[in-house]
Each structure stands twice: as structure tokens, then as C-alpha cells.
Amino acid sequence: MKVQTVLYVVDSLGLSGKTLTLVNLAQGLDPARYRGVVVSLAPLEGMLADRLHKGGVPVVHVPCADGLQANVVGKLLRLGQQYKPAMVHAFNPRPMLYGGIAAAMTGRPAIGTLSAFACISAHEHHGFLPQRLATTTWRNRLRNRVLGRLLKGVTAVSRRAGESFCNDNAIPPDKLHVIYYGVDIGEIDRVAPDEVARVRAELGARPDDVLVGSVGRLVEQKDYPTQLRALALAVPRARRLRMVVAGAGPLDGELRALAAELGIADRLRWLGERRDVGTVLRALDAFVIASKFEPFGVAVLEAMAARLPIVATEVNELPEILDHGRAGVLVPAEQPEALADALVTIAADPDLRARLGRRARSVAAARYSLASVITQYQRIYDTVTGERSER
């Protein structure tokens, strides 16, 4: 069987659930059937671009300014002549438009994948949004309707999110596929006990300490101020409770100052951006996410795979991810008192931590394994490339 090339098109390779999915997919394809080539419309920077380079996946930068740029299609056509892809797989509406047009002009099929944020309807009310929605102008809506004709299929990370996008943009519902984000469970399982012990020692954790941690950018969306205030409220009732934050971002200095003001600086460790996230998670006793807004939290999936009990805010898709509270503890957003109560309960009850951790791992293995995600995408590839070969 001939190995077929999939041309991936994405706005940028900045770290997100969407781009992690792309990179994991491009690197995890069955090498006997498919190989990936990645096109980024933004400069090639960051750890994901490095991962692709080191993994032997070709990565190309096609410069694209804001707004619609007709010359991008021409550049994709030239790349098509070079790599001869069997199909195009684009991520989010603007790359889906460019990739879909280039594919149609060469008689190749194209599919699209939507991030959870891209699916959010302008008709919905949200108390907080991290950026402007992609469906607020008539140009955006016209573009999104064109996608329904250009693409063989559209994937979304949840049924609710995908149906919302299709309904708002007149995309036939039979083109929708639901494929969750995935996590490499085996990679987390392969973390050695001595590596876990090393990180616990690095964090200064004693055997009876309860380490509760987060992984995420230090931005308003993640609502670390509520998380820090909850820790301050919990500490008098949970003396062995410690908190770890892995991530970097513009609020770093402000959050450190708040921790000092709350008198909990000695209970916190700021790790910055880490490449050994799996090891850090395995070194924790519980995971917390206090986001105001979280369309689909990949860090939560990784924590579930690491068998961690999870305390999360009841926003967006987090209740669905956590099996509606059966695989974690859900609390209202922006309420430090409720979050503090959950942290105290988790810290005081090792049996509860173990039970929630087992359930979280079971759900992760059943719904969110990376191997399953890759298999589902390859089935779509088989279908659309098979349709082309039959013509």
C-alpha cells in the first residue's frame, strides 16, 4: 500500500489543545499508511514546532497577515506540487478556508477540525471570554458557510460544541464528527518512580504533605486569584496542604504578589513552563483547575490519565470531561470559599483521593486516549481518500 501524505494547515503552533492534537496526530500516524506535513501560517516558534522537527515531521511556514489573503492559496498549491498530499486537514476556520480552496482546486478532499473555542456561538452568554469570537461578523459567518461546501467533514471535541457551530453556519449535520482531544496515557505510565521522587524532592515535599497542583498559562482565564484565595482559606483547616503551579504567563508577578499578600507564599511553588508535565503530575496528590472559562481542558485529561483526583470549576465542557462529577469534584467558578471546602475535603481523605483518581483514569482510558483519537482520524482519512481513489 502506498503511503499517503496528509497536509495539515493551522494558524500557529502556539501551545493549546488544538495544536497538541495536531502535533500528536502528525507524529502518531500509522507510518505504513500515512505521513504528515505541517503548514503554519505563523512563524515556527515554541516547543511544538521543536517537537515536530525532532520527530522528523516536515514543518513549513506560510506567512499570512490578518484578514483574508488570496496569495496563501497559491502558496499552498505550490506546496501541494512539492509534497503531493492525498488530502488536506485544516484546523479552525481561517486555515480551513485556505486549505479547503487549495484542496478543491486540485481535486483533493479536505476535512476540518474545530477547537472548542471556535465553536462558541455569538448567541450564547458567557461571563468571560479570553478573546473575540470567530463568528461575530458577517464576513466570518459567510466564510464559515462556505466551509460546508468545501469540506468533506468537520470534527469537533464535543457534540454540543459541534452542533452549535453547524447550526449557526448552515453546515450539514451529517458532516459533523465528534472526536475528543486525546492524551498519551502510555507516556504518563512510563514515568519512572525515581523521577517522581526527584520532583517531590525538588518541591520540598514531605511524605505526609498533600500536593495539589495546576498546569496552565498564567492568564485571567485560569483565575489563579480565586485559586490562591481558596488556598489561603483552606490552609488553617489542612495543615499539610501545599500547592504547585506549572506554567508561565503575563500575570506571574501579580500572582506572586497576591500570594505574599495572602500569607501563603511558603505554601506555593511556581515551576514556570515545564517539559516534564507528566512527571510533575505523577508527583502530585491532586489536581485543581479554577478557570472562569475552559472549553476543553487538555491539562485535565493529562491529570485524569495520571490517576489524580480533580477539583474543577463547573464551566463549559469540564462537567462532561469529568463524567458530570463522578470523576472529580465540581465547584462554582469564582467562589474561593467553595473551592477551599473542596480542597480541604480532598486533603483530608486519602480514600476519596484514591477512589476519584481510579475513576478519572478509567474515564480517560475509555474516552480520551491518544491512540483512540488517532484511530478515529485515520478512519476518516481512509474514507475520504478512498472516495477520491474510486472516482
Image (cartoon, helix red, strand yellow):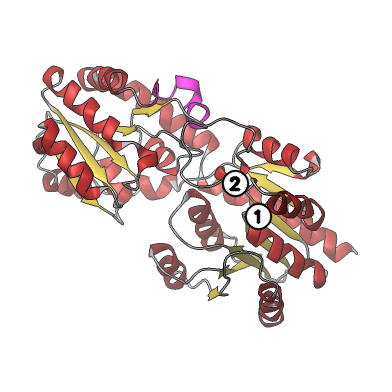
For disc 1, the marked residue is: 93
- Within the magenta stretch, is there residue 322? yes
Q: Is residue 345 above or below residue 2?
A: above
Binning the other alpha carbons within 10 Å of mark 2 as few (below 14), some (14 to 19) or many (20 upward) gives many
- At 60% across and 39% down in the image, what residue appears? 120
The foreground one among 103 and 381 is 103
Residue type marked 2: Ala
- Disc 1, SS: helix
- Of the numbered discs 2 and 1, the one sitting upstream in the chain is 1
Pointers 2 and 1 in contact (C-beta within 8 Å): yes
State the image coordinates of residue 82 (x, y, percent, origin top left): 67, 82
Q: Which mark is residue 118?
A: 2
Residue type marked 1: Pro
The quadrant where residue 149 appears: bottom right
Instruction: Pick out the residue farthest to the right.
Output: 391
Which segment did they paint magenta? 317-333
The quadrant where residue 264 appears: top left
- Disc 2, SS: helix
Number of numbered tags placed on the structure image: 2
State the image coordinates of residue 45 (x, y, percent, origin top left): 41, 69
Q: Is residue 263 above or below residue 329?
A: below
